[in-house]
Amino acid sequence: MFRTLDQADVKGKRVLVRVDLNVPVEDGKVADTTRIERVAPTIREIADKGGKVILLSHFGRPKGFDRKDSLKPFAPAIADVLARPVAFAEDCIGEKAAAAVNAMKAGDILCLENTRFHKGEEKNDPAFVAALAALGDIFVNDAFSVAHRAHASVEGLGRKLPTYAGRTMQDELEALTKVLETPTRPLAAIVGGAKVSTKLDLLGNLLAKVDILVIGGGMANTFVAALGHPVGKSLCEHDLLPTAREIMAKAKSRGREIVLPVDAVAAKAFAANAPSRVVALDGVGADEMILDIGPRSIEHVCSVLARVRTLVWNGPFGAFELEPFDTGTVEVAEAAAELTSAGRLITVAGGGDTVAALNAAGVTERFTYVSTAGGAFLEWLEGKALPGVEVLKVR
Ligand code: 3PG
Ligand code: MG
C-alpha cells in the first residue's frame, strides 16, 4: 500500500525526513523526548545506509519567525538520543539551509529550523514546497502525529519527491490499520474524555466497527443523564441527551453493546484528594460531581476486556490528573496490560491525555502499540483520510 525504507535507495542521497518535534519544552530544554526516541530508528537506519539525514519539523503555532519556537534546542536533544552529532541550520529553505546541506557528508544528520516560520508551510504553497524539495532527493515521512495536516512538509513534499514511510510511520500505520480494518474479534473500544460533542464523528465511526463500545470520562455523564439518572454538578452536556439516546438506539439496532458506568466516585469539589464517596448511579447528590468510575464499573470493564481480543483506547475514565480520581483509568489500564502480556489481548491506544494517563499508570511498554499522536489519532478513529498518509500510498 505504501513504500517503506525497504524500497528506498538512500546511499549518498539527501534525504528529507519529516519528524514531529512538537514536544514539551521547559526553560529552553526539551522536556519529553518520547517523539524523538520514536524516530531515532529511522534516522539511524538512513544514516547507517549512507544517506544524508535532513530533519524537517514544525514546533508550536508561530505566525512567522518567533525565537521561542526555534528548533535550535532540539539539535542537541536529538544528538543526545542518537549519541551522534546533529548540525543545525537557521532556516529550512534558502541559502542558509542550502549551505548546511551542501556541507553534509554521507551519514551526517542536520536539523533545519521550524517549517512554520514560513507562511507557505501551513498553506501548502507550491513555491515553498519547491524550495524544500530543492534540498533533497527523496522524502521520508516518519511523523504520523502530524499526518492530519495538509502542510507543505507533510503533504506537498510527498507529491514532489519519491516518498517513503519511515519505520515509525510504518509501525503506526500497520498497528492502526490492523486494529480497525482487520481486527482479531471481538473488538472493543474505550472512548473517554470530557465531551460527547467533540467525539460524535468518532463514536459514529467506531459504532460501525467495534463489537463493544465502552464509554468513560466526563462524556459518560451525558449518557448516564440520558438514561434518566441524576448527575448533580457533573460535567454533562444536557443539550446532547437526545444525541446520546440516538447513539444508544443505533448501537442496539446494530447489535453493538454499549458499556456505561454502573457506579461512580462522587465529590463536592474538583480537586485532588477532595473528600469523595462511592455511589450507585442513581445516588449522585445535587451538590456532587462524578469524578471517576466506581469499583463495580471497574470490575465490569475488566470483565469486558477478558472477553474481547482487541482493544482500542482513547480517553481516560475519570479526572485522571487528580488523585485518587485516576483509579478507574489506572486499574483498567493495568488489567489491559496484564491481558496483553499474557498474549490474550491486542491493545492500541493514543491521544494526548490517554498517553499521559497510560504513562502515569506505567503500562505503556506493555501495550501492543501506543501512538504519540493526538489530533491525527482522533481523525484516524473518526475514519477520516489523513493527507500525510494518503500521499504515501503508492501511485
Ligand atoms: C501535534 O502535536 O498534535 C502535532 O504536532 C500537530 O500540531 P498542530 O496541532 O499544531 O498542527
Ligand atoms: Mg495538536
Image: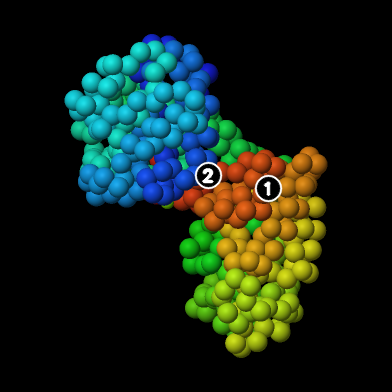
Q: Which residue is mark 1?
A: 363
The residue wearing badge 2 is 372
The answer to whether mark 2 and mark 1 are in CB contact below 8 A is no
Q: Name the front one of labels 2 and 1.
A: 1
Residue 235 in view in this figure: yes
Q: Amino acid at mark 2?
A: Thr
Side of 245 relative to 93 (left or right): right
* Residue drawn at point x = 53 percent, y = 51 percent: 351
Q: Quadrant of residue 179?
A: top right
Relative to residue 163, is residue 374 depicted above or below?
below
Q: Which residue appears at 29% of the width and 20% of the height?
A: 101
Query: Based on the displayed image, in which of its 4 quarters is residue 289 positioned?
Result: bottom right
* Along the line of sight, the residue nearer the viewer: 10 or 213: 10
Indicate the position of residue 9 as horizontal and vertical percent values: 44, 13
Q: Looking at the rendering, in which quadrant would you find the C terminus? A: top left
Residue 126 appears left or right of 236 = left
N-terminal label among 2 and 1: 1
